Image: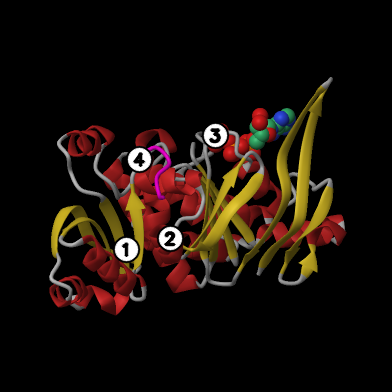
Amino acid sequence: MIEFKNVSKTFRSGQKKVEAVKNVSLSIDQGDIFGIIGFSGAGKSTLLRLVNMLERPDSGAVHIQGIDIQKLSAKELRKRRQRIGMIFQNFNLFNARTVAGNVGYPLKLAGIPKKEREKKVTELLQFVGLADKAKDFPDQLSGGQKQRVGIARALATSPDILICDEATSALDPDTTADILKLLKQVNQDFGVTILLITHEMHVIQSICNKVAVMEAGEVIETGNVFNTFTNPQHVTTQKFIRSVQQDLPSKSILEKWKANGGKKLYRIIFQGDITNQPILSTTTRKHHVDFNIVYGSVRELQERLFGNLLISFTGDDSHIKQVLKELKTIVKIEEVDDYESGLV
Ligand SMILES: Nc1ncnc2c1ncn2[C@@H]1O[C@H](COP(=O)(O)OP(=O)(O)OP(=O)(O)O)[C@@H](O)[C@H]1O
């Protein structure tokens, strides 16, 4: 659907040169809710702006449905842009226009007759739950309602792609959850492919099926959300994941554990059907080893379960070795001895 092929974009002002996007290759499939996460300055907005050619790449190409959008004529690009909706952190509504006026604006630009426009606006306002606000002005709305207007406006021209630029960053947690639910509905009901950028991992966790992590202009990790959450490879990804799920106790607890002569700790990560099986008790019992769960949880993500337990073992060293060897064939095990570096 959207393909970034070795895309780079550098900004120059005077002597200064910023490589905002560096050799990025990414594939976003039709129907995806694809999240791009990164800290401030990572290059997320620039990457988004390359999709509708608000920025042009210095090298590489962006293809949408197999077409290199840089090669489109001005007229073709205008047409393509009409099918790419966009919503923003600060909503970007016209304050002098009513809610209905805002939603109908792209249709007016597209030359849609008034009657047809009004019908579409009514349908869209119903869809976003603002049927009773058509005549209100943006100033009279809450942040969540403003973003609903933004979504309705973005959907007016029946886009196949919706780009969300930190769309929930200005909203409180409850309103964020409502807006994310609405975006999911947009994806499911209209089959719209959603590309969103955020610096909040909970947004990715809530609605995305795929994620790319950006740092200093590069995509440092990408994959489906479940795999990325259960098996993050890059330290930055691990940091983001810890912001929504604490997979290890705090450093001070771990230090106390060590200071009090606590045993070696192992982190066990398991997923899917394995969460239903008593693998720990079966394996340890077989080798006459005891285990102690120090910390952990079993969670649901993308309608699948995954567990993360911090465990110590008591018993003969050679028996513990045997237990670890057997467990390693079934689940992922990491020895935890350096909290700062995360996974060992
Ligand atoms: N028009 C521009 N001119 C010069 N530098 C720019 C321009 N746009 C972006 N940059 C720089 O490119 C880098 C990436 O910026 P970008 O806005 O894409 O990052 P971001 O991940 O979206 O950050 P944020 O979350 O803060 O918006 C930054 O160093 C930024 O200062």
Q: Which mark's residue is nearer the viewer, 1 or 3?
A: 1
The span shown in magenta is: 338-344
Residue 167, above or below 279: above
Residue at the image point whose x is 19% and y is 70% from the top = 280
- Real-space Cα separation, disc 2 to disc 3, in angstroms: 24 Å
Mark 3 CB lies closer than 8 A to ligand 1? yes
Q: Which mark's residue is nearer the viewer, 2 or 3?
A: 2
Q: Mark 4 points at which residue?
A: 339
Q: Is mark 4 on a helix, strand or loop?
A: loop
Q: What residue type is labelled 3?
A: Ser
Does residue 258 appear anywhere in the picture? yes
* Helix, strand or loop for the magenta stretch, by majority: loop
- Real-space Cα separation, disc 4 to disc 2, in angstroms: 17 Å
Q: Name the residue under label 3.
A: 40
Is there a contact, CB below 8 Å, between mark 2 and mark 1? yes
Q: Where is residue 328 in the image (x, y as percent from the top left)?
A: 35, 70
Q: Earlier in the sequence, mark 4 or mark 2?
A: 2
Residue at the image point whose x is 85% and y is 55% from the top = 74
- Real-space Cα separation, disc 4 to disc 1, in angstroms: 16 Å
Specify few, some or many for label 2: CA neighbours under 10 Å numbering under 14, 14-19, or 20 or more.
some
Q: Which amino acid does label 1 sit on?
A: Ile
Left or right of 157, for residue 174: left
Is there a contact, CB below 8 Å, between mark 1 and mark 3? no
Q: Which amino acid does label 2 sit on?
A: Asn
Q: Quadrant of residue 110?
A: bottom right
Does residue 123 appear anywhere in the picture? no
Q: Which mark's residue is nearer the viewer, 3 or 4?
A: 4
Left or right of 11, for residue 131: left
Q: Which of marks 2 and 3 is nearer the N terminus?
A: 3
Q: Name the residue under label 2.
A: 231
